[in-house]
Structures are given as C-alpha cells and as structure tokens.
Image (cartoon, rainbow, N blue to C red):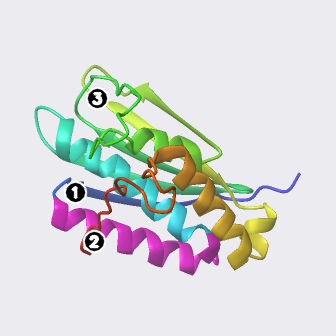
C-alpha cells in the first residue's frame, strides 16, 4: 500500500478586511508551491467569501483559523470560527449588494458544507478537485465559459425598451489586497 502524506497549511487570524487580503496571498503562494496554480482563483474567491462571513456575522469575536489541506486529488479549504450559529443560504434579491457568498462558494466548488466544532464554534469548508482537466491545462475558453455561466446565474439584468442597453448593471466590487 502506498501512502501519500497530506499537505497542510494553517493560518490563525482576526477576520478583518486587511487580514483577508493577506490570507488570500498566503493561500495563493501555498498553491503555487504545491504546483496547483489553476486552483488559485477559485480557492482565493472561496476563502475570501468565508472570511468575509466571519467578519460580518461571527460572534463573540472574529478570531478564526483557515486551513488548506491537499489529499491526493482534492484540495479542502476550511474556516473555523467561534460562533456556533450555522450559516443559512438565502436567495438574494437581484439588486442586493450582499447575500451571495455561500451560493458562489457552492457554484465554484466541487462540494461544500458546515459542521459544528465543539460546543462553541463551526467549520465551513469547500473542496476543489486537483485532477480535473481544468487543473491540468487551464484554458481561457473554459475560464470564460465558467465566468459567463456564473454571471448569468447570479446577475439578472433587465433590458431597456430598445433591447440594446440594460436598465441597470450589476454592481461590481473589488477587495483591496
């Protein structure tokens, strides 16, 4: 029997906006070190969303632990916090400026979930496959198809009477870091 040891990276932090960017850079560097460059965008997006939820919702404090683990053909990213309340995935209104984070995590990951962690905490996690063709040979065409699919799924834009211009455009945001 051949046993492959898992690879771990753990970061403990306060989920503050300035720290979220730092953790995103740590995750990116670790995935580059593991030669998983094709997973950087999705892992960074997922960890950003999970840490943003901790920043916004966690009580009594914002202390959390991010763990990334590579086991054979799967990368698992998890965020552990001290708030026992389980997250709820709601359908966000088309013009809402928040409320889509877990839906985005679900859309871009292979699987995701949440589990209690002791008496006062939880772990929210997602997985990404490392053996898919997209990881082995990413292409701009497949990336564009995923982006267009996600855009259609999460943004409903109405059209004006002439059918050429949207009545409104979805909000765009950027996180510094």
Mark 3 nearby-residue class (10 Å; few <14, some 14–19, many ≥20):
some
Q: Residue at x 68, y 63 (%)?
A: 145
Q: Quadrant of residue 69?
A: bottom right
Up-down: is 167 above or below 134? above
Residue at the spot of label 1: 13
Q: Residue at x 28, y 29 (%)?
A: 121
Label 3: element kind: loop
Magenta span dominant secondary structure? helix
Nearer the N terminus, badge 1 or badge 3?
A: 1
Q: Residue at x 19, y 36 (%)?
A: 58
Q: Please provide percent x and percent y for residue 20.
A: 26, 62
Label 2: element kind: helix
> What stretch of residues is rendered in magenta?
17-38
Mark nearer the viewer, 3 or 2: 2
Q: Please provide percent x and percent y for residue 146.
A: 64, 60
Whole-Å distance between the Cαs marked 2 and 1? Answer: 10 Å
Residue at the spot of label 2: 22
């Amino acid at each position: 029997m051949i046993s492959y040891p898992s690879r771990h990276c753990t970061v403990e932090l306060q989920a503050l906006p300035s720290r979220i960017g730092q953790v995103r850079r740590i995750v990116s560097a670790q995935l580059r070190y593991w030669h998983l460059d094709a997973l950087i965008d999705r892992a960074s997006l997922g960890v950003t969303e999970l840490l943003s939820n901790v920043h916004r919702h966690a009580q009594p404090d914002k202390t959390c632990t991010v763990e990334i683990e590579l086991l054979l053909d799967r990368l698992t990213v998890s965020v552990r916090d001290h708030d026992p309340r389980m997250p709820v995935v709601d359908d966000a209104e088309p013009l809402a400026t928040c409320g889509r984070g877990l839906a985005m995590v679900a859309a871009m990951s292979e699987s995701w979930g949440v589990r209690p962690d002791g008496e006062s905490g939880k772990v929210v996690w997602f997985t990404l496959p490392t053996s898919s063709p997209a990881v082995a040979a990413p292409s701009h065409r497949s990336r564009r198809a995923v982006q267009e699919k996600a855009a259609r799924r999460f943004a409903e834009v109405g059209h004006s009477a002439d059918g050429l211009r949207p009545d409104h455009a979805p909000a765009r945001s950027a996180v510094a870091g």
